[in-house]
Image (tube, rainbow, N blue to C red):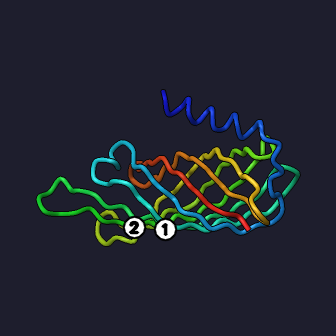
Amino acid sequence: MKRFLAMFAMFYCLTALSANAQRGTSLGIGFDFAFPQDNFGNGAELGVGPSLLFQSPLQQNLNFTVNIGYLRFNGDSPFANIKYREGFIPIKAGLRYFISEAIYGSGEAGLSISTADGSGSGVSFLYAPTVGAQIPAGNGAIDLGIRYEGWVKSGTRSLVGLRVGYNF
C-alpha cells in the first residue's frame, strides 16, 4: 500500500507540472528492471537489460511505439548447485496516449524470444500495459514507466517492469 501511495504521489506531482512533453518522432534508449511474479519468481530473480524505443505521432496525444530490448535473469534453481540464467528478447509494438502534458498510458503486444536451449526456449506472446511520465530534459525527454508484462506460451510468466530512459 505504501508503494502504491508513493507512486500515486509521484504521478500526481508530475501531472501538476506544466511540462511540455516531446511529441514528435523520437528514438529512446533505456534500461529496464524486471521483477518476476508468481511462478516465474520461484527461480528467477531481478532481470535487467537495455532497450530501444521508437515512437511516432499518429494523432494529437497518440503515438505508435516499437520497443526492443534484452532482459537477463539470474537466480537460484530448486536443484542443487544449478543456477538459473536465461535471457529474453522482447519485441513489442503498441500505442502510447498522453493523458496530460507529461503522463501517459500505453499498451503494447508482441513476442518474447528466449535465448535459452531446452524446454524453456522458444517464443511467447507478450502483452504489456504501462503507465509513465515523459519529462522534458534538454533537447529530449526523460522517460519513466512502470508496467505489468505477461508472456504467454503454455502458461504465463509475468513480471513488473520499470523503465528509465531518454528519448532523443
- Mark 2 neighbour class, 10 Å CA radius: few under 14, some 14 to 19, many 20 or more: some
Q: Residue furthest right?
A: 60
Q: Residue furthest top?
A: 1
Give the alpha-carbon distance from disc 1 to disc 2, as whole Å: 7 Å
* Image disc number at residue 135: none
Q: Secondary structure at mark 2?
A: strand
Residue at the spot 78% in from the left edge and 41% down from the top edge: 17
Residue 15 appears in which quarter of the rendering? top right
Q: Is residue 128 left or right of residue 18?
A: left
Q: Position of residue 85 (x, y in %)?
A: 30, 65
Q: Is residue 122 left or right of residue 54?
A: left
Residue at the spot 83% in from the left edge and 57% down from the top edge: 23
Q: Is residue 14 above or below residue 167?
A: above
State the count of labels.
2
User: What amino acid is labelled 2 in the image?
Assistant: Gly
* Image disc number at residue 87: 2
Residue 79 appears in which quarter of the rendering? bottom left
User: What amino acid is labelled 1 in the image?
Assistant: Tyr
Mark 1 or 2, nearer chain start: 1
Q: Position of residue 116 (x, y in %)?
A: 34, 70
Residue at the spot 13% in from the left edge and 62% down from the top edge: 81
Which residue occupies the foreground of this view, 85 or 21? 21
Residue at the spot 66% in from the left edge and 55% down from the top edge: 143
Q: Position of residue 89 (x, y in %)?
A: 49, 68
Q: Position of residue 25 (x, y in %)?
A: 80, 66
Which residue occupies the foreground of this view, 46 or 116? 46
Could you tell me if the residues under marks 1 and 2 are in contact, i.e. CB atoms within 8 Å? yes
Q: Is residue 37 above or below residue 89?
A: above
* Image disc number at residue 70: 1
Which residue occupies the foreground of this view, 125 or 100? 100
